Image (cartoon, helix red, strand yellow):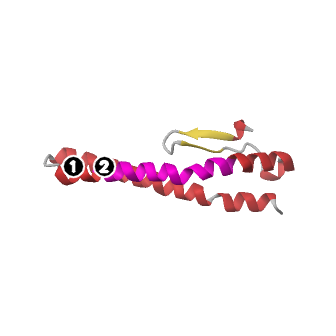
Amino acid sequence: MKEDFTFDSRLGIYIPDLRADWNQYSKANQEAILYHWERIRGSIPDRIADLEHEINHKQAQLSDENDFPRSCQLNTEISELASIINDLWLWYRADQRVSGKVHQ
């Protein structure tokens, strides 16, 4: 079952990596995958909060930064963190499609 998930180092979480069509999994495997996903999914808001904390720290640094190249670097880092947060929210909402398949 763990082979059905791959660690995404950018997002900092395991994401589903299903190697077969959902309907090819047995009901028991579907339920195990969903259970594992729900545990991962439940950790996403905490991961987002950590990233928001990093953004706030970088924004505080940016407000005091006088070096233009360093300001650009901080802005780039803030943008990347915001992009990660956006992707995490997408994964957080992705369960609705998957869990609906199991209950059909």
**Seen in the image, is 77 located left or right of residue 7?**
left
The reply to whether the magenta stretch includes residue 12 is no
Q: Is residue 59 left or right of residue 103?
A: left
The magenta segment = 37-58
Residue 57 marker: 2
Specify the label residue 81 is tagged with: none
Residue 86 % position (x, y): 48, 57
- The quadrant of the image that shows the C terminus is bottom right
Is residue 96 shown left or right of residue 8?
right
CA gap between label 2 and label 1 equals 13 Å
Front residue (pair 37, 50): 50
> Looking at the image, which residue is at 51% across and 42% down?
12
Give the class, few, some or many, for how many residues have Cα within 10 Å of label 2's Cα (few <14, many ≥20): few
Q: Identify the residue at horizontal 83%, vertical 47% (top origin).
A: 25
Q: Nearer the viewer, mark 2 or mark 1?
A: 2
Q: Amino acid at mark 2?
A: His
Residue 71, x across and y down, in percent: 21, 49
State the SS at label 2: helix
Tell me which residue sits at (40%, 55%) in the image.
82
Residue 87: x %, y % from top left: 51, 54
Mark 1 falls on what kind of element?
A: helix
User: Which part of the image, by quadrant, shows the N terminus?
Assistant: top right
The residue lying toward the viewer, choosing from 52 and 97, is 52
Q: Hey, which residue is sitting farthest left in the picture?
A: 66
Residue 96 place in picture, x, y as percent:
68, 62
Give the main secondary structure, helix, strand or loop, of the magenta stretch.
Answer: helix
Residue at 40%, 50% (x, y): give it: 81
* Type of the residue with mark 1: Ser
**Label 1 neighbour load within 10 Å: few <14, some 14-19, many 20+:** some
Residue picked out by circle 1:
71
Is 53 a magenta residue?
yes
